[in-house]
Amino acid sequence: MNWIQTLVDAIGLGSVYALVAIGLALIFGVMRLVNFAHGELITAAGYTLVVAHALPVPVAIALAVLVAVVLAWLMERVAFRRLRNAQPATTLVATFAVAFALEAVWLIAFGARGESADLLSSLNEPAIQTGGVTIRWVTIAMLGVGGILLGATTLLLNRTKIGLQMRAAAADFRAARLLGVRADAVISAAFVISGVMAAAVAILLTAQQPLVTPTFGLEITILALVGIVVGGMDRLTTATMGGFAIGFLNSLLGNLLPSSERVYLPSAVFLIVIIVLLVRPVGLFAPRGASTAERL
Amino acid sequence: MPEPAAAATAATATPAPPVLEIDRLAVSFAGVPAVREISFSVKRGEMVGLIGPNGAGKSTTLLSIMGAAPVVGGEVRVDGASLRGRRTEDIARSGVALVPEGRHIFPGLTVAENLELGEISRRDDGSHPDSEIDVRELFPIVEEFRHRQAGALSGGQQQQLAIARALLSRPHLLLLDEPSLGLAPSVVEVVWSALRQIRERGVTILLVEQRAQITVQLADRSYVMNNGELRAELAPSEAEDLEKITTAYFGATAEGER
């Protein structure tokens, strides 16, 4: 294990965290809702891969995307829509409730030990091997999928009607509605996109490590949330960079710390986070003199 | 939304209903009344002014027409149809446009994107050809600065953009909330002249303003609102009668209010 190898792996994992961050930041941008239950979408897609592991890979992937998207849409429709005018604290607690309820479902249905979604583990084969550096297919997939989905989201926001409406709603929801922007459509669109992101994360994570447990999506979501706050959560780009940074850092420190010290990994990550927030409370990547006018 | 056929029958058989009817409208914020059972109407092609001091309930009246204020009594009808329980975006899509106080343009979007958002509610069914207005001719700056960030425009330019954006939905009822607020006198003149032209094209207008005298002069009639109530009605001929306007504005205090 050398430095370049460590960096390559960290970039791969950073891309996955960036995808989590995009999903979270889109919802926050449009609704001012920190969707703590986003991790359950990842877990749901993970368990779909477990159940569908005997099916052809493209079918299993399509099913995982479908399940995550439908669950995301349902979450908003059933739980968050009624709370749209509630206090932020109320809606935050509601996202906790949804997360814990779904976690209980996973526990009952699949048990605590975890199930294997052994579908894409062939991606762990090396793709490129030179001078002691091994680049695995899964790392390339993480980078590629991350880049494509980030690009697609940017295009959607900047080039489509619904994207323009989402940006308007994120900047000033009431003004957007006064112009005829349909609140339900914009919010549903944000949840559907976040579902796609969650499915992609689940597919990439299980390719690297196939074990899906009830807290499969929770851990990465908590860490990505921290990354978003550090990066600057009121802009999609800074939030995505923050997500990437925390994934990168986590992977980097995980490789640098000797195995006996690995228990201190979260402490080390959060120590760095605290220092960053003390130095730049508006966000590490927020532009100078940043305001909250532009959010997507 | 009234069927075009039904609207046409109504126009020939019985007199057409006013474009806007406010019927004993009452609005309260957490139990504190902001609008107290006011009633008035605006007929097709009319321009009606709503003047009064800060906190009188003028903006709240406009917002309640758009379904964006907590209405506790009475109702708002547009073209005879009640707006009760309808969502803001649906009211906007039915041909009512509000230029909100403080403009509320999207500063991070370009001028062109702001205008595109104005077109969301446009209905190309030809039901309101009277409100076909070339906003680019009315406000040349919105064309000139098309690709600029809206936030980079001056206050007066932003106000013109906000009005242009509202007009792009081809509204048959245009609600304006203090369009002259915070603008330089020369820009105020641009806005007033645009309003005159918009009215000449037959758009029905409800104008909320602090500048009482010019509003009374410009509008077909004006209501003075204070403390959530309509206190007086003024005709354009009364625009020079400053005493009457002042009394209507502040008369409430003499009656022992507060």
Image (cartoon, coloured by chain):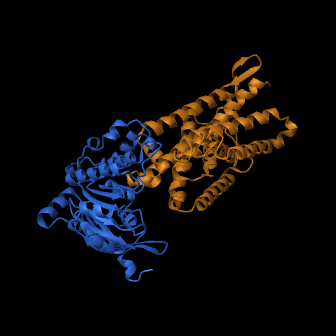
Chain colours: A orange, B blue
Can you say which quadrant of the picture contains the N terminus of chain B?
A: bottom left
The image quarter containing residue B134 is: top left
Q: Residue furthest left?
A: B12
Can you say which quadrant of the picture contains the C terminus of chain B?
A: bottom left
Q: Residue furthest bottom?
A: B256
The count of marks equals 0
Which residue appears at 68% of the width and 30% of the height? A11
Which residue appears at 37% of the width and 49% of the height? B159
User: In the rendered view, would you say B237 is above or below A95?
Assistant: below
* Viewer-proximal residue among B30 and A258: B30
Find residue A70 and report its horizontal and vertical position in percent.
52, 48
Find residue B80 and report its horizontal and vertical position in percent.
24, 66
Residue B253 seen from this side: yes
Find residue B213 and report its horizontal and vertical position in percent.
29, 63
The image quarter containing residue B27 is: bottom left
Q: Is residue B18 left or right of residue A134?
A: left
* Viewer-proximal residue among A276 and A147: A276
The image quarter containing residue A102 is: bottom right
Q: Is residue A94 left or right of residue A156?
A: right
* Viewer-proximal residue among A171 and B231: B231
Q: Is residue B173 left or right of residue A35?
A: left
Which residue appears at 64% of the width and 54% of the height? A99
Find residue A200 and report its horizontal and vertical position in percent.
59, 38
User: In the rendered view, would you say B151 is above or below B185?
Assistant: above
User: In the rendered view, would you say A128 is above or below B11?
Assistant: above
* Viewer-proximal residue among A27 and B25: B25
Residue A70 seen from this side: no
Q: Residue furthest top?
A: A131
